[in-house]
Image (tube, rainbow, N blue to C red):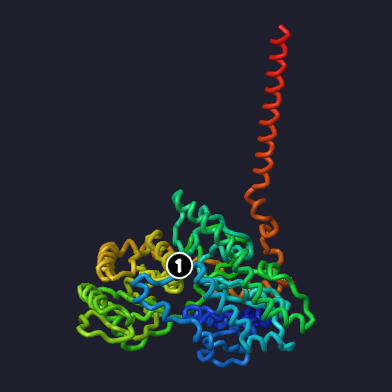
Amino acid sequence: MEKFKCLLFFVVVSLCSCDAYKILAVFPMPSPTHGILGDNMVKHLLNAGHEVTYITPFASKQKSNPKLHIVDVTDHHNFFNTDLLDITQILAGSMNFKDPNFVFSMMMNIAAMTLEHRDVQKLMKDPQQKFDVIIGEYMFADLYSTFPAVFQCPYIWFSTIEPHWMIVNLVHGPMNPAYNGDYMHANIPPFSFMQRVQELWILLTGLYRHNNEYYKREEEVYQKHIVPILKEQGKPVPDYKVLKYNASLLLGNSQVAIGNAVPLPPSYKHIGGYHIEDEVKPLPEDLKKIMDNAKNGVIYFSLGSNLKSKNLPDELKKGLLEVFGGLKQTVLWKFEENLPNQPKNVHIVQWAPQQSLLAHPNLALFVTHGGLLSLTEAVHFGVPVIAIPVFADQFLNANQAQHKGIGEKVDLTYNLHKDLKIALDKVLADLPRYTARMKELSTAYHDSPMKPKEALNFWVEHVVRTRGAPHLRSVALQVPLYQQAYLDLLVVLLAAAVAILLLVKKILCYFKSQKSIKQKEN
Ligand SMILES: *[C@@H]1O[C@H](CO)[C@@H](O)[C@H](O)[C@H]1NC(C)=O
């Protein structure tokens, strides 16, 4: 029976993989999380038999594969300063990651640097290069949607966070701000009156910036780095506006079970969790021993790959060690250095295979920065969380975890150790309830017709098979916002009301004058 199943599997696989496509994957963001997302997407596409050209700043990490062609943009690391995420600056509140102009300018520079990069230019100028489809990572700049003008093939956006208005705007139009929050402000619906007003304001000012200042700056880059190539190759030069709104599909690193059940256009497809390995890798011997022997369960504490916890102020380190030392659970702390006076139940690990730890039955609680990859892994393996958000969408993820009852949120301040103790006491006292809720969510997340990586491959291939999936294109793109909001009807009604008022006034005046004439005659 097993053999027969195997055979059947191979027949099915070989039938499916007869169409191998040439794919360009654009993931130039020099940050580890984005590297994980890009690498895993490329891995799945290669495993499905496709040939991938991969623009990545993590070139040295790639395994050689005859079907993989690397375009190396490692230089990007020199321009994107990860020290921006220095924990001391965050604690001091001197970060400007909440300023949309700051974020846009930084992301726009990375996008522009990618388009003008000598190897990317070489790729675009090479007439031998042909692609069936292009996948580009959305990072607050819309510029990668100009690649299809050069290669004349369909384009797919990849969004790294929960669906939000900026990205959905590109394939459908803005999302209704009455129940779709901007990811930065981290509001969870249903909103209060003030929150609804705030969301509307963010949307309107954001749309204004994107349609004016940002649009102009991006169009300049398009004119400078893409248009000359199109002219030289005798290809049509589309308007930047047309390219910007011409993506065939939007793949989201999201899942309904983890985010909100918001209405999305047919071209939006959830593939969140595709970065998680099918088979859990075995733990290294020393970690396995710690995990197996933890009679009271294990708490795993990691602030992710961007933040260096060694930059934590000494008092905080000491405070955290004291809090952890007072617990009956074993604590695994992912940290870059060893600490003096470590309590017996606390183990410091420089590196940890996070998925393998989360998969261990003794893992009771995950204390995380609340990055979406970590939260998705927690849901995948059914482990409740305490989230300490640091930047970007992490505040939203933390609020969401709290809202769904799968965890609690703690602010990153000089009081972290005290606040974390309160949260730990709360969650540990009620752990079975948090765990049960997390398991429910995990069941909903897993109960799906396709695994995330299968959905990824299916929809990418679908776009190629249907020549850009025009049937999925949202009709809302053809209806201007003022029409969607019926502002034209409002104008007609107002005009009619004014006309009626004027008419009534005229009639009244007429009768009045008639009356006075009659009175005079009498
Ligand atoms: C828009 O996308 C479709 C589908 O990929 C493609 O056929 C069309 O040529 C694109 N339009 C422009 C102006 O690039």
Q: Quadrant of ligand 1?
A: bottom right
In the displayed image of the protein, which residue is found farthest to the right?
A: 234
Position of 378 relative to 124 (above/below): above
In the displayed image of the protein, which residue is found farthest to the front?
A: 520
- Total residue callouts: 1
Q: In x, y percent, where is residue 157?
A: 61, 72
Position of 444 relative to 55 (above/below): above
Which residue is rendered at x = 23% and y = 78% of the image? 318
Q: Nearer the viewer, residue 86 or 506?
A: 506
Is residue 392 toward the left or the right of residue 473 in the image? left
Which residue is rendered at x = 69% and y = 41% of the image? 492
Q: Which secondary structure, mark 1? A: loop
Q: Is residue 367 visible?
A: no
Q: Quadrant of the N terminus?
A: bottom right
Q: Quadrant of the C terminus?
A: top right
At label 1, the amino acid type is Lys
Q: Is residue 93 visible?
A: yes
Q: In x, y percent, where is residue 429?
A: 26, 63
Which residue is rendered at x = 50% and y = 86% of the image? 78
The picture quadrant where one finds residue 398 is: bottom left
Q: Which residue is mark 1?
A: 98
Which residue is rendered at x = 69% and y = 55% of the image? 479
The picture quadrant where one finds residue 9 is: bottom right
Q: Nearer the viewer, residue 254 or 449?
A: 254
